[in-house]
């Protein structure tokens, strides 16, 4: 007898699976080794109960899967405005009139899946910009970018996504979120492999950028990238094109982070990543039917139909000589 349960770890947006065999069940999680738990041999009539109990267990063990910010990140600027708390489980970035703040991952990566839970600046956040992104170094850098543009109290945040390859960006797609990102933590994710880049919010795909090098579109595939996050003053452009400025009487403006997970290939001293690690980033997640299967594609269309507010691929004024080639596919 064998049972396979697949789902999302509670509060994390991360896939997990449970396989129950005679004598043992295994919880497979990413990243990290599986958990093995001894059970007794059971009849087929007990399978439904096991499914229910193991689903509950998945939510209980969530905290085991989270990383530690002390181990994974360096606070790079902002002095006391960047803080790691609760034994490494919580990180906060703040902005005041003197400075913003930021952090970066200790590791560089080449391909994988990256998840971060964030709670954005509450209240009147107009003019503030909170970012979460992957980036390489140098002028011809690659970048996978989430930017959260603040707004007046009661008005929705704008999530702006962008991609750079070999130093060229100008690929913005912007969305309203279908929830208040300041009330609770939500998971923002990027899947990056040789074939595609997927942006996700709470494990719902909102954008897919395919590798179209075959038609001359550069694609990030050779430069290792770090994970970065910052909060800074963008009131020259962030809210209504810069018409609404930051109200400094509301400072400090603080964003909170938890449960960072990277199922990715770590790039070490220029050594190429092992194929096994790359496959973990590509096959386990990017081709998962839960991400871009029929239901995932339906969710993607739902987000883009109802919540997308800007798409560079439809901006003829911006590209009077013709839209970028990837927009024609």
Image (cartoon, rainbow, N blue to C red):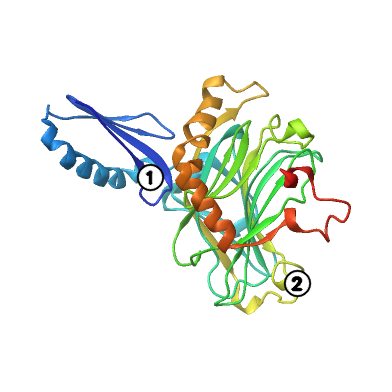
Q: CA distance from mark 1 to mark 2?
A: 39 Å
Q: Secondary structure at mark 1?
A: strand
Looking at the image, can residue 194 be seen? Answer: yes
What number is the disc on residue 8?
Answer: 1
Q: Is residue 268 above or below residue 196?
A: above
**Which of 247/17 is in front?**
17
What percent of the width, then of the height, locates residue 45? Answer: 11, 36
Question: Mark 2 falls on what kind of element?
Answer: helix
Residue placed most toward the observer, 125 or 92: 125
**In this view, which residue lies farthest toward the right?**
321
**Quadrant housing the N terminus:** top left
Of 24 and 246, the residue lying toward us = 24
Label 2: how many Cα within 10 Å (few below 14, some 14–19, many 20+): some
Which residue is under mark 2?
A: 242
Q: x and y percent of residue 302 in the render?
A: 52, 57
Q: Quadrant of residue 128?
A: bottom right
| Pointer 1 or 2: first along the chain | 1
Q: What residue is drawn where x is 80% and y is 50%?
A: 323
Question: What label sits on residue 88 in the rendered view?
Answer: none
Residue found 60% across the figure and 23% down from its top = 273
Residue 55, percent from left and from top:
26, 44
The residue positioned 55% from the left and 53% from the top of the image is 301
Residue drawn 72% across and 69% down? 235
């Amino acid at each position: 007898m064998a049972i396979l349960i697949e789902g999302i770890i509670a509060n994390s947006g991360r896939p997990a699976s449970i396989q129950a065999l005679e004598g043992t069940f295994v919880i497979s999680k990413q990243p990290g080794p599986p958990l093995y738990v001894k059970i007794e041999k059971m009849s087929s009539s007990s399978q439904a109960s096991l499914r229910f109990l193991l689903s509950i267990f998945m939510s209980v063990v969530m905290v085991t899967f989270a990383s530690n910010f002390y181990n994974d990140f360096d606070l790079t600027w902002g002095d006391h405005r960047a803080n790691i708390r609760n034994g490494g489980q919580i990180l906060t970035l703040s902005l005041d009139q003197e400075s913003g703040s930021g952090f970066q991952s200790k590791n560089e990566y080449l391909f994988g899946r990256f998840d971060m839970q964030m709670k954005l600046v509450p209240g009147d956040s107009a003019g503030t910009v909170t970012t979460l992104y992957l980036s390489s170094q140098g002028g011809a850098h690659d970048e996978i970018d989430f930017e959260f543009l603040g707004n007046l109290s009661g008005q929705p945040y704008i999530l702006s996504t962008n991609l750079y390859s070999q130093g060229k960006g100008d690929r913005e797609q912007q969305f309203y979120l279908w929830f208040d990102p300041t009330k609770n933590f939500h998971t923002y994710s990027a899947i990056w492999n040789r074939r595609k880049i997927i942006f996700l919010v709470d494990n719902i795909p909102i954008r897919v950028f395919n590798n179209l090098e075959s038609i001359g579109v550069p694609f990030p595939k050779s430069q290792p990238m770090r994970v970065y996050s910052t909060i800074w003053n963008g009131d020259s452009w962030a809210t209504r094109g810069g018409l609404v400025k930051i109200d400094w009487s509301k400072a400090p403006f603080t964003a909170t982070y938890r449960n960072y997970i990277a199922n990715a290939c770590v790039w070490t001293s220029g050594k190429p990543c092992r194929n096994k690690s790359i496959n973990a980033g590509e096959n386990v997640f990017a081709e998962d039917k839960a991400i871009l299967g029929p239901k995932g594609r339906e969710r993607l269309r739902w987000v883009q139909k109802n919540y997308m507010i800007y798409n560079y691929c439809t901006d003829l004024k911006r590209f009077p000589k013709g839209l970028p080639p990837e927009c024609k596919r």
